[in-house]
Amino acid sequence: VDQVFNCGSWGEYALRRKQVQAEMAEEGAAWTGELRTDSCTKGEAADWFRTDEYPGGVNEHWLYHGTSLEGEAGITEGDFRLNLAGSNAGTLYGNGVYLAEAVSKSDEYTSPHGANGIRTILLCLSCLGRVNYNDERRPD
């Protein structure tokens, strides 16, 4: 396990988080429910949900992103690149950064590397803001 802290990306994230806080204070939250869809979360409230720093709320969570070793290097040394979105696994909901609340979802988007087949999953602090929630079995 390695911890990566990219100062440039963090500065952009912190600025956008302030903007999201202002938007949510003005428009309210669309959906801020629990993030759980499989048995690995057992329905418990997430202890990493960070509302104390932003009392108005920004719907901030730690989420998983499965990728390849090359993808991990590009993301951690630079940033997520939307022009590469879906290049490994497709884009069901269009171009964007795909994150999951359960590692059991993100591991499907990894690829093995090295003799021992190690896979790469990033744990990303994510500011969700106003979520467009969809629970359709087969979204169009």
Image (cartoon, helix red, strand yellow):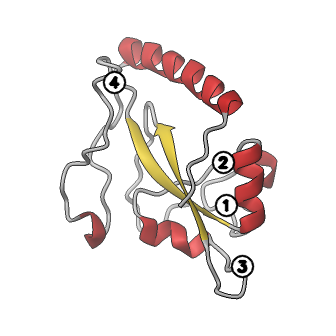
Q: Considering the image in quadrants, where does the C terminus appear?
A: bottom right
Q: Which residue is mark 1?
A: 91
Quote the CA–CA distance across marks 1 and 3: 23 Å
First in residue order: circle 2 vs circle 1:
1
The answer to the question of whether label 1 and label 3 lie on touching residues, with beta carbons closer than 8 A, is: no
Residue at which label 4 appears: 57
Residue type, numbered disc 3: His
Mark 1, other Cα within 10 Å: few <14 / some 14–19 / many ≥20: few
Q: Earlier in the sequence, mark 3 or mark 2?
A: 2
* Element at label 2: loop
Horizontal side of residue 7 vs 21, given as left or right: right
Looking at the rendered structure, the secondary structure element under dot 4 is loop
- Secondary element at tag 3: loop
When the figure is inspected, residue 98 is found, relative to residue 10, above or below; the finding is: below
User: Mark 4 against mark 2, which lies toward the viewer?
Assistant: 4
Q: Which residue is mark 2?
A: 96
- The extreme right residue here reads 83
Q: What's the amino acid at mark 4?
A: Gly
Residue hosting label 3: 113
Q: Are marks 2 and 1 in contact (CB under 8 Å)?
A: yes
Q: Which of marks 3 and 1 precedes in the sequence?
A: 1
Density class for disc 3 (Cα within 10 Å; few <14, some 14-19, many ≥20) is few
Q: CA distance from mark 1 to mark 4?
A: 29 Å
